[in-house]
Image: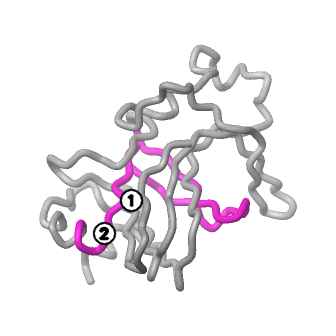
Amino acid sequence: MIEVKNITEPQRIYIFGSDFDGKTQSFSTTDDYDTVDLYQDGKRLNTMDISGFCFIYTEEEYQENKQLIDEDGAGAVDVVILEDFVGKISVDVRYTDFDSENRISTIASESLLKPDADIKEYLKYETIDEDEDEDDSENDQYTLDCILFIDGSFTSINKQLVGDFLEL
């Protein structure tokens, strides 16, 4: 697991699944569209669509960079906003299991990241099972997912399409 943000004072946090031109992303999952699951205390809060990378910004960071958002690529991806967040946000790659009958997704493995995984690279390609084809895996009943662990508190969570968010 790799820590992405550590927030000590309550503030609004933006988790964007779209590009900010010329800015280094907080992390990348793959080189294509993907999803990221948000978990808190072992429970899935939400799943967001991303363009393969995420930007996690405080209110101040968002205000400084909002003019750089790629509006053309923002339509099909999400932004999640955490209000009054205090705590840590970390990213990891794990196997998850979806119980379709109860519509519950659970984490089914420990971290799959290599010990020297680089957050600036594609995380799903930096796993200990990297050489194994996911479709041929012995874990084929599970899904390889990138997960954001929300270790902290917030007063509300709001998810919407980035395109809709930009229209407000």
- Identify the residue under disc 1: 76
| Amino acid type, residue under disc 1 in the picture | Ala
Disc on res. 163: 2
Where residue 19 appears, x then y in whole percent?
A: 26, 52
Q: Dividing the picture into quarters, in which one does residue 111 lie? A: top right
Residue 58: quarter of image: bottom left
Magenta stretch: give its range: 32-61
23 up-or-down from 119: above or below: below
Q: Amino acid at mark 2?
A: Gly
SS of the residue under disc 1: loop
Dominant secondary structure, magenta: strand
Is residue 4 within the magenta segment?
no
Can you name the residue that lies furthest to the right here? 101
Please provide percent x and percent y for residue 144: 64, 37
Residue 127 spot, x, y in % from top left: 57, 26
Q: How many marks?
A: 2
Does residue 152 appear to the left or right of 105 in the view shown? left
Q: Tell me: residue 35, above or below residue 112.
A: below
Horizontal side of residue 110 vs 116, given as left or right: right
- Which quadrant of the figure contains the N terminus? top right
Viewer-closest of 144 and 82: 82
Residue placed most toward the observer, 70 or 151: 151
